[in-house]
Image (cartoon, helix red, strand yellow):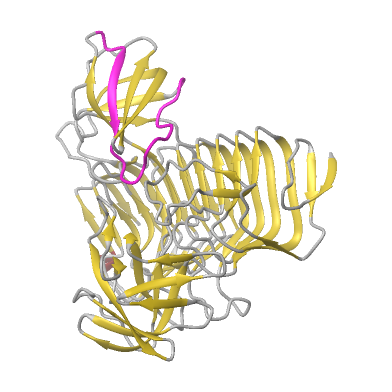
Amino acid sequence: MNEKIFAVGTIFESDTVYRADRAVYDIYPSDSFEEIPCWWTFLNSGNIPLRAAFVLRGLKNVTIDLGSAKLLFHGRIMPFALYGCENVTLSNFSIDYDRPFYTQGTVVGYEAGSVDIEIPELFRYRIEGRDFIALSDTWEHRLITGDMLLRCMDAETGKPSRHSGVILGLIGGEIFPRPNPPLPIHHLYAEDLGGRRVRISGLPDFFVPRAGEILAMTHEDRRKTGFLLEHCADTSIRNVRLMHIGAMGITAGMCHNISLDDYSMYMDESTPDRIISINADSFHCYHCTGLMKIENCRFESMLDDAINIHGNYLVVTGSDSDGRRVMAQNRCAGLLRMEFLAPGDEAYIYRGSTQELRCSGIVESAEYTDDKGHVDIAVTFRDGLNTLPQPGDIIENRRMPEIEVRNCRMKCSGGFRISSGKRVLIEDCDFETSSFAVLFSGDMNYWYENGPVKDVTIRGCRFRDCGSVISTACGFTPTEAAPYYHENIRFIGNDVCSSRGGVISLSDVRGFKYRGNRINGVSLDELLSLTRCADVCIS
């Protein structure tokens, strides 16, 4: 292996180790940075090209080991983008931004519909009329376009508060909401009270901040992930701390084998006056294969899930009479064009939104056409289908990974959102989440994230006052022929401490084993809520 010095502007090569020559790298916006095509969201609230500082394409056997250096970004820059690489290791560094892509303020007053906050000096801003404008040395952002997430955080624990929930909003005299949001976008107004105090009005009645809490307001689209991985194999990220990222920590698509070890995000004495590490998910993975191995990680202070692993359903719109060519549409909210199906993929087609398998086949080709925000896909199957699919049927790509998560700590909003039919093992983890700790979902009406789990073991974990320990959710329609969605969930030898009942809430599950668990604060009857479940074993 060759050895070279890591630097801004490096043109990376295969079979090379890159090492740092300094403790801190200050990285500023540059037109020389490669522009990254962004398909995973239609949001671009700043109307600016997305550029990545470090891009690796088609490389093999690369190690970037920075010996505890900090990468400090000044501006709207994606740190890393990897395309079609094999055996890349990223290790021993941290990532931070000079001005986080959110603004926070301590709640100093509240009346129905409005909240007064005091904003630390780190979060520069100005008020014009009723508009709130977030500022940095390299950008400013008027919070009137797209959407913005608002959440109250407990100043002592760093966890989201349970009583106020989460809302989307925009702040200004005139706002321009994005289409088809997952939640209503509220029209909010800013008023400068002086002394770095700001009043935000227009809040819905159910959003009730309390004095001393921290109100966090995100104001950046979700394009600026820390690490973008596409079509990569055998990627390792080790001893990497994300002090702040404006979107996902890792976005990984169509990858094979990803290993995370001591990949962490949390607040401490080195991040004073901050309550948020990452504006979205820490690890968001779709249509991957092989093994997703996640060990010794610390997921804290994010505004979304620690881990989200899924595929995506497509909706059939028509087919040729011989069953070889099927027309489908991507209806996943926020996604434009991504590789939902590729040659060699096995696809299952279900009757409507049920789990009744209509037919299956091997993909020969997939042709994509972008049409006004939705993507039409013409799928050709190698040998044709023995049964013709009908409009409204659901296509599931069987490209899925195995998942192993060990010795991780969660202190955040949502824990693990898992949608994979392959083997899943979660062991020796600590959960302290305000909403779900582990969620098995499937969605056929907004995100279209598939699919059902078939082989899950959760053992030796500790759950402390989580919103829910395990829950299931799905958008499918049960039928007499296919009444269940998830299968074979084992919950063995775990510790649960909760002041609330119903913290294991399962529906439409066949095969649930509960054995050797220790619970405190609730009875077993209060702990378990099982609806339309079969083959349940409790011991």
Is 327 colored magenta in this rendering?
yes
Q: Nearer the viewer, residue 124 or 226?
A: 124
Q: Residue at x 44, y 25 (%)?
A: 342
Q: Nearer the viewer, residue 333 or 75?
A: 75
Q: Position of residue 486 (x, y in %)?
A: 31, 43
Q: Position of residue 415 (x, y in %)?
A: 43, 60
Q: Position of residue 67 (x, y in %)?
A: 77, 60
Residue 446 sits above or below residue 66 on the image = above
Q: Is residue 394 left or right of residue 311?
A: left
Q: Give the quarter of the image for residue 221.
A: bottom left
Q: Is residue 92 left or right of residue 417?
A: right
Q: If the image is split into quadrants, where does the C terminus sit?
A: bottom left
Q: If the image is split into quadrants, where does the N terminus sit?
A: top right
Is 227 colored magenta in this rendering?
no
The residue sitting at the left extreme is 480
Q: State which region is magenta.
A: 322-344
Q: Nearer the viewer, residue 136 or 520?
A: 136
Q: Residue at x 70, y 54 (%)?
A: 91
Q: Position of residue 249 (x, y in %)?
A: 52, 55
Q: Give the quarter of the image for residue 520.
A: bottom left
* Secondary structure that dominates the magenta span: loop
Residue 102 sits above or below residue 399 on the image = below
Q: Residue at x 77, y 51 (%)?
A: 6
The residue sitting at the front extreme is 129
Q: Residue at x 73, y 41 (%)?
A: 12
User: What is the count of numbered marks?
Assistant: 0
Q: Is residue 433 left or right of residue 31?
A: left
